[in-house]
Image (cartoon, rainbow, N blue to C red):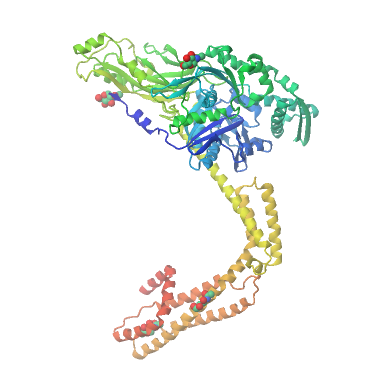
Amino acid sequence: MRISSVFVSLLALIPHAVLASVLAIDYGADFTKASLMKPGVPFDVLLNKDSKRKIQSSVAWKRGDRLFGQDAAHLATRFPSDTFSHVKYLQAAPSDSEPAVYFTKISQAEITRSDRSTAHVKRSDGTEWSSEELIGMQFGYIKHLAELVANEKVRDVIVTVPAYYTQFERDAVADAVEVSGLRLLALINDGTAVAVNYAMTRAFPTPETHVIYDIGSSGIRATVVNLSTFTDKTGAVGTQLTTLGYGYDRTVGGIELDRRLREILISAFNAKNKGKDVRTDKRGLAKLWKEAQRVKAILSANNEAMSQVESVAWDIDFKTKVSRAQFENACEDLESKFVQPLHDALANAGLGLSDVTSVIMTGGASRTPMIQAAIKQIVPADKISFNVNADESAVLGAALHGAGLSRQFKTKNIQVQDTIAYDVQATYFAAGTTDVSRPRSISSNIFPAGSKVGAKKTMTFKRKDDFTIFFDYKQAPVPGFPTRMIEVHINGVADAILNMTEMGIPDPVIKATVSLSDSGFISVSDAFAYGEIKDESLTGKLKGLFGGSSSTEEETGSAEHVPPRETPGSASSSSSSTSSTAAAEGSAASDDEAEKKEEKKKPKPGPVEIELKINNQWTTVPPMTVKQKKAARESVDAEELAKHRREEARNTFESYLYRLRDLLSDESEEKPFRKCSQPAERAKLTEVLEDSFQWLNDRGDLAETSQLLDKRIALETLEKPIIHRYQEIEAFPQALNNSQMWNWHTRMFLAEARQNLTAEIEKDLPSKWTKDELDGLEKALKDHESWLDEWVEKQKKVKSFEDPVIETTEMKARAKVLEQHLQRLYRRKVPKAPKKKTTTTTTAAAKETDADEEPLVEDEQQVPLGEKKKKGHDEL
Ligand SMILES: *[C@@H]1O[C@H](CO)[C@@H](O)[C@H](O)[C@H]1NC(C)=O
Ligand SMILES: *[C@@H]1O[C@H](CO)[C@@H](O)[C@H](O)[C@H]1NC(C)=O
Ligand SMILES: *[C@@H]1O[C@H](CO)[C@@H](O)[C@H](O)[C@H]1NC(C)=O
Ligand SMILES: *[C@@H]1O[C@H](CO)[C@@H](O)[C@H](O)[C@H]1NC(C)=O
């Protein structure tokens, strides 16, 4: 009889992935790799638009335009303040933390402190951007690439993270995923993903233990994995993959080597240019960074490299020779760091090198000779293996794992049991003392390092009032990061306990389920008041003798699938909600208060649970709120829209230029453009056109939408008179016909009307018009006719390349005036006509003009306004 409404409905909203494709992203500090799993599409790494298998983890703005990958990274030397790489260091990083400070050493970007205390970067236009937004944009770009391959929308994504990533950083990844419009299927530790890739094509008849040694750009991680074979209930065979231990160093990797090499180049430059410090020049630093990467690659295979950079700063060209010895010397202090994670991981797993089948090398920096040399000093050569793809094993493993999670692919059955790298503590204040001043706090190591993910633990409290559970890392996981992860307020306790007491339940307790999700997120997934209604019957009493509270059974039974991120951020509330938490401290001396059995209400015996409210609060580095994520998504979308508009303007401009060039180059005299233009006009157009082409080639990439429009308008203004002449020539015959037609109609009308008028006067019948009115119309007709004759004669002498002397619009307008004059009289109703005879005779006459009347009415419908006016006039 569990009272749970909110929780169940929340779970029901989480869709069980049924979408066709799964995207995997291995987001690195330098490069990102992605892979798409879709039925019918070959399983491989996703290529970018230049068919590159890895995509630089960069985003840059060039004026209004946003660029990614290599296009973005290339801009670093031109727009150092608007190019952002290595943003991975800023994930959830407080602005004064070690990763954020390190970022400022390798990036020219300016960082600021956000109201979440994390580091944001500042663009040259003054706008500030979070890592979640910048990475969300990059994920969005990859989503777009994937959709081109999948030919459909791609939503589900699995993202790799280093095992050492804290909850703060995992939240930052999850938030970036949301900002990009993707949906997080799971996070997977990158070492584990490599192991999945390794296991993909192998069988393990006898259990094997390997160390995945991943030397990436922003850190080294060692993962000890155990691979064995299992047979499930149906007899199917699968591979069991279990992580046994982790070792890591967040300060060493390919980027630190780049930085050391750049230091060599900086020193060399400054030494050669006394009085100048290239550190003060952002573009110079960016150029030397690029050069350092190039030189490092050369030194991997050579003993020395020639470094040469044009116009580093102050227009000074720079040239120097760097030897491998020089480089290695500059990295001497790192040597022990290269291998320490391996020692740590083995120690963490409680194993020695001799227990390990192989050390599997992976990661971009694993090719660096100095790192390989360091490993070779401690690992026997026959145990070092390079049998996975150093760049792609993680993303391919992640994709396979993601496909398995989505349950719609037939993949090799690899069961993954991962573990966490840090101790997680739960702390709460002891209930009790009436003295509110100093409550005693109680901590427990609820998930020690090495705990299996996908687990749940139940904490039991004797409480009568709301209280708070604090979750902390035992030690600061990264210098400058907080230890406090989250505060969970359990609300509604007093009510629930009161109800239970009223039901006659002795000693009700509060149970909170703490989940460690498969993606490594800690959260309180539910909390309820729990008690048992005693069975007062004899059998019940006998049962009671053998003890056994049903609560523990219930707990293990409920360890079901945990949604990927049932953390604070996505589910339940945002960080603002607090309510009555201060009351927790006020609880009276109640720990061992006497049980009051109330015999009044007596529901069925058995366990009773009443769901309690869970309120998450972040006091250190909060994840983004729903509102912040929505705003971020909108601004990312707005950027996207602006980009599209710019691209469209550019494309339109470009095709306009080509069309114009075609017109100008066609020499045949028959072509309207040629006929209607003068040599001088064409010369001017050609000149501006060629300038525009030049401009588009040189600066089109930098141009804003408005500039593109301005350039087009400038050309169109020159082209317009020519087009106008041609259009007038085209329109003239019809306009003339129209004018003549109304002349003719009017003349016909006048003739008939005068005839009738005369007849009516003779018979003394009322007339529709007076003679003056008919004279007035006749005058209008004559004026129109003579105007038309005069100007049509003049127009006929105008050459095709000259501007027309009368405009067809004027012709139409004048014809309209005559037409309306005619209509006014024509529509006039017969004033009281007592004799039927007149009407019958006129019907016969009307037959003749029937054909002429048709256009009159037709045209009338096109000017309903005039008609209304007329009617109004008639009524008056
Ligand atoms: C690896 O897993 C197998 C199968 O579960 C087990 O028998 C073996 O002891 C494990 N090895 C280590 C080193 O944990
Ligand atoms: C306690 O019981 C009352 C009356 O039965 C009910 O209205 C209320 O919702 C209950 N409170 C809780 C927390 O279950
Ligand atoms: C002008 O009108 C006449 C008669 O209605 C028609 O035959 C001719 O095709 C028209 N010319 C144009 C250019 O519309
Ligand atoms: C002239 O009179 C006849 C007969 O009454 C009528 O049918 C016809 O419409 C009249 N013509 C005009 C222009 O009003």
Q: Is residue 300 above or below residue 679?
A: above
Using residue 108 as the reference point, say whether residue 745 is left or right of it: left
Residue at point 48%, 41% (across, down):
153
Using residue 275 as the reference point, say whether residue 240 is left or right of it: left
Q: Quadrant of the N terminus?
A: top left
Q: Nearer the viewer, residue 269 or 441?
A: 269
> Which residue is most to the top?
545
Q: Nearer the viewer, residue 320 or 754?
A: 320
Residue 842 position, x and y percent, is 35, 84
Using residue 820 as the reference point, say whether residue 316 is left or right of it: right
Residue 810 position, x and y percent, is 55, 72
Residue 482 position, x and y percent, is 53, 20
Quarter location, residue 114: top right
Quarter location, residue 319: top right
Residue 667 position, x and y percent, is 69, 65
Would you say residue 97 is visible in this rendering?
A: yes
Q: Is residue 263 above or below residue 688?
A: above
Quarter location, residue 607: top left
